[in-house]
Image (tube, rainbow, N blue to C red):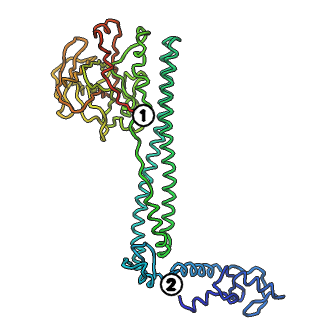
């Protein structure tokens, strides 16, 4: 900036750059404080330069001149090297700071790399803008993740309350002497709810803090990007360090929801030896956490039907999203197992077994069994395809028998006790789960509990359900 321009920005009284300049009727400008001090020493309020008498005690602020002076002071101080009072013309790529020509030749910057100020500012702004965009994308991911966690927390609360009511309803049927058992079950549910609610609360709190911190980082970085080149480069190193300090967070993990199947599955059977005439046992307990969003599972977890609209359920990893399906709450890892399903009221269904777990597409990796579609029956596997069965009978109930060790799945008509089809499949994996897919009502038939059934197993052999293992991990 030229000397003449610098003089134009100086107050005639203090000879320094204007501070809060005011303009008089004679068009001259002075610092507001300088003018007030001048008038204190003079009996008549005259103008310092032209000596004319002032008609105003409070002259207006010269806003244009004030902005020009502030810009001059800011730009001038930012552009001058504090060590050598030389103009900053270069940017050191090793120290990430603006330097003057004398700094470049000093020992401190020996063998360093330099770029012109304008070129470095443009390049570094572009890099930082790209980083900010990445942070904004990450912020949106965190916001979406927090929304899922909020939804899962609300769903868990609904699950817990609904499960609690079901437990209480069942125990009311079993007389007062089972009260202690009921209390034990509810206590276990509440402990799980508290543990999982606390874990979800902590995750939500972490996400809230991370969102707030990330928002502040983005705001601070965007503020830095609006500065002039030299001022921006002064802050560049700090800004880069700041945007690189945001750690990644994990998504909603498996087992985050209330394990309803653990609390409700075969609840009556667990106390059947004292109340066996009042309870029933289902060989398959449907898992609500795996149910497709269009399906509705009954309160006792043995029936499933298509709802009138999609259910609002979390997108937890166990849930099937590809087909209208639901898995059993427990899988089989050995032995022979059988269950019957009432299919009278459904016109389209698939019954059989599926490998444990759900893949990224939202469906088990392998399924096989029997299929009814458009009045025709088929059987086969997901990978090999389904073959049409030459049967004319309309089945009301299907029995599924799984021989895990021999890798065989048999489907039969329990009404006539005749075999319909047998599938041999050399599947991979250590666990198989009963599998149901339907667009209409299906019901898993309960087993009849009697003393004779226990005697037929022989001494030393445990009940079949001990061959199961839970898929849930708390």
Q: Nearer the viewer, mark 1 or mark 2?
A: 2
At x 72% / y 84%, what residue is drawn?
Answer: 34
Front-lying residue, 406 or 413: 406
Residue 407 visible in the shown view: yes
User: In which quadrant is the C terminus drawn?
Assistant: top left
Q: What is the secondary structure assignment of the residue under circle 1?
A: loop
Counting from the top left corner in percent of width and height, residue 71 is at 57, 79
Q: What is the secondary structure assignment of the residue under circle 2?
A: loop
Q: In the visual, does 245 lie left or right of 304?
A: right
At x 44% / y 46%, what residue is drawn?
Answer: 145
Front-lying residue, 282 or 406: 406
- Report the disc number at residue 467: none
Counting from the top left corner in percent of width and height, residue 116 is at 40, 80
Q: Which of the two discs, 1 and 2, labels the residue nearer the N terminus?
A: 2
Counting from the top left corner in percent of width and height, residue 160 is at 49, 29
Q: Residues within 10 Å of mark 1 (few under 14, many from 20)?
A: few
Residue 45: image quadrant is bottom right
Q: Is residue 452 above or below residue 145?
A: above
Marks 1,2: beta carbons within 8 A? no
Residue bearing mark 1: 311
Seen as rendered, the residue at the extreme bottom is 50
Front-lying residue, 334 or 52: 334
Q: Is residue 399 above or below residue 18?
A: above
Residue bearing mark 2: 84
Q: CA distance from mark 1 to mark 2?
A: 71 Å
Q: In the visual, does 264 lie left or right of 354?
A: right
Q: In the visual, does 219 lie left or right of 345?
A: right
């Amino acid at each position: 900036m030229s000397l003449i321009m610098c003089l134009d920005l100086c107050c005639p009284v203090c000879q320094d750059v204007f501070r809060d300049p005011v303009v008089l009727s004679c068009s001259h400008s002075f610092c507001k404080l300088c003018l007030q001090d001048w008038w204190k020493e003079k009996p008549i309020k005259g103008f310092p330069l032209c000596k004319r008498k002032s008609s105003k005690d409070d002259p207006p602020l010269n806003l244009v001149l004030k902005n020009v002076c502030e810009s001059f002071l800011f730009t001038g101080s930012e552009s001058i090297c504090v060590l050598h009072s030389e103009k900053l013309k270069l940017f050191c790529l090793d120290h990430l700071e603006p330097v003057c020509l004398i700094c470049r030749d000093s020992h401190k910057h020996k063998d360093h790399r330099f770029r012109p100020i304008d070129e470095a500012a443009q390049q570094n702004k572009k890099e930082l803008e790209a980083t900010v965009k990445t942070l904004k994308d990450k912020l949106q991911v965190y916001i979406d993740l927090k929304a899922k966690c909020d939804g899962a927390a609300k769903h868990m609360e609904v699950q817990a309350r609904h499960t609690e009511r079901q437990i209480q309803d069942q125990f009311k049927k079993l007389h007062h002497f089972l009260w202690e058992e009921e209390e034990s079950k509810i206590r276990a549910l509440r402990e799980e709810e508290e543990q999982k609610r606390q874990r979800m609360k902590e995750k939500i709190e972490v996400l809230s803090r991370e969102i707030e911190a990330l928002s502040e980082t983005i705001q601070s970085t965007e503020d830095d990007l609006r500065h002039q080149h030299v001022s921006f480069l002064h802050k560049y190193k700090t800004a880069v360090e700041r945007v690189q300090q945001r750690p990644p967070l994990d998504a909603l993990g498996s087992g985050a929801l209330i394990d309803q199947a653990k609390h409700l599955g075969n609840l009556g059977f667990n106390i059947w030896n004292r109340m066996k005439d009042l309870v029933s046992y289902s060989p398959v307990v449907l898992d609500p956490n795996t149910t497709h969003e269009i399906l509705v599972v009954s309160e006792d977890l043995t029936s499933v039907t298509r709802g009138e609209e999609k259910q609002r359920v979390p997108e937890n990893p166990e849930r099937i999203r590809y087909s209208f399906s639901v898995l059993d709450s427990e899988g089989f890892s050995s032995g022979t197992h059988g269950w019957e399903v009432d299919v009278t009221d459904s016109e389209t269904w698939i019954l059989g077994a599926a490998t444990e777990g759900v893949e990224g597409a939202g469906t088990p990796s392998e399924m096989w069994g029997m299929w009814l579609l458009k009045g025709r029956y088929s059987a086969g596997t997901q990978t090999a395809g389904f073959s049409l069965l030459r049967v004319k009978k309309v089945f009301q109930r299907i029995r599924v028998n799984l021989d895990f060790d021999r890798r065989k799945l048999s489907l039969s008509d329990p009404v006539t006790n005749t075999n319909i089809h047998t599938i041999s499949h050399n599947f991979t994996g250590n666990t198989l789960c009963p599998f149901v897919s339907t667009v209409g009502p299906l019901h898993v038939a309960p087993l009849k509990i009697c003393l004779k059934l226990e005697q037929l197993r022989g001494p030393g052999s445990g009940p079949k359900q001990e061959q199961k293992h839970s898929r849930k991990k708390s």
